[in-house]
Image (spheres, grey):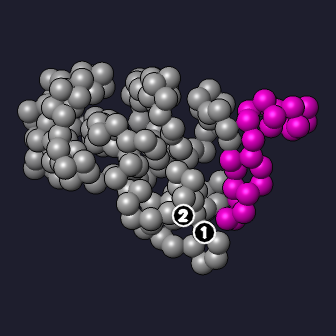
């Protein structure tokens, strides 16, 4: 549910917020600033420089993250996300869905070890939702670890190997989809 602590938990993983108690471990180690270079993060609040051209913006973000930009990789992602025709246009000419796909490309173009997506489908139409979902599944097949938050359990069931649910900052369940369905699935009523 809204306000359960999904974004707060993600921000603690990213060292934006610090836990009041306990600790966060990433890549098997206590969370540190050095891990940030290995994580691609798509925040819930999107932020793009509106006066920059799309390809220039992506190059800039990749250089910030990795110290260099792989223009072939950027162009591959632009094609995959059906944005090649918009590569030399300013960000402020893009629709909300296109802007969201640009932000997704900025998150994954440096090939991070861990990808964290906070509400990646929010505000997307069904076609762009499917495009983004397809890209996520391709990354998963290539071995990427992806954490994403969602309110949509149907989407989570389609793409997740492991589900973690929280309410009011507390874990209420976690496990594989099969484990959860075996434990709780008999009392489910769909209307």
Mark 2 surroundings within 10 Å by alpha-carbon count, few (fewer than 14), some (14 through 19), many (20 or more): few
Residue 16: x and y, percent? 43, 67
Task: Tell me where residue 186 sits by quadrant.
Answer: top right
Spatial CA span between label 1 and label 2:
7 Å
Up/down of 13 relative to 130, above or below:
below
Residue in the picture at 19% in, 34% down: 70
Mark drawn on residue 63? none
Badge 1 marks a residue whose secondary structure is: loop
Q: CB atoms at circles 1 and 2 under 8 Å apart?
A: yes
- Left or right of 100 on screen, residue 188: right
Residue at position x 75%, y 41% in the image: 175
What residue is disc 1 on? 23
Point out the tag, 1 or 2, that comes first from the N-terminus. Answer: 1
Q: Quadrant of the C terminus?
A: top right
Residue 121 shown in magenta: no
Q: Is residue 166 magenta?
A: yes
Q: For the view shown, which residue lies furthest in the right direction?
A: 186
- The residue carrying mark 2 is 30
145 or 103, which lies in front?
145
| Image location (x, y in percent) of residue 179 | 81, 34
Where, quadrant-wise, is the N terminus in this rendering? bottom right
């Amino acid at each position: 549910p809204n306000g359960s602590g999904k974004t707060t938990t993600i921000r603690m993983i990213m060292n934006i917020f610090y836990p009041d108690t306990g600790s966060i471990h990433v890549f098997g180690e206590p969370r540190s600033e050095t891990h940030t270079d290995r994580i691609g993060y798509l925040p819930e609040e999107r932020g793009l420089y509106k006066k920059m051209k799309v390809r220039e913006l992506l190059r800039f973000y990749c250089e910030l993250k990795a110290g260099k930009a792989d223009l072939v990789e950027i162009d591959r992602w632009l094609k995959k996300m059906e944005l090649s025709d918009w590569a030399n246009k300013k960000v402020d000419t893009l629709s909300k869905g296109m802007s969201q796909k640009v932000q997704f490309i900025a998150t994954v173009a440096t090939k991070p070890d861990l990808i964290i997506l906070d509400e990646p489908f929010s505000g997307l139409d069904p076609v762009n939702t499917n495009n983004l979902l397809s890209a996520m599944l391709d990354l998963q097949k290539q071995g990427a670890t992806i954490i994403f938050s969602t309110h949509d359990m149907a989407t989570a069931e389609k793409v997740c190997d492991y589900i973690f649910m929280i309410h009011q900052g507390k874990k209420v369940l976690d496990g594989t989809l099969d484990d959860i369905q075996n434990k709780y699935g008999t009392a489910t009523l769909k209307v």
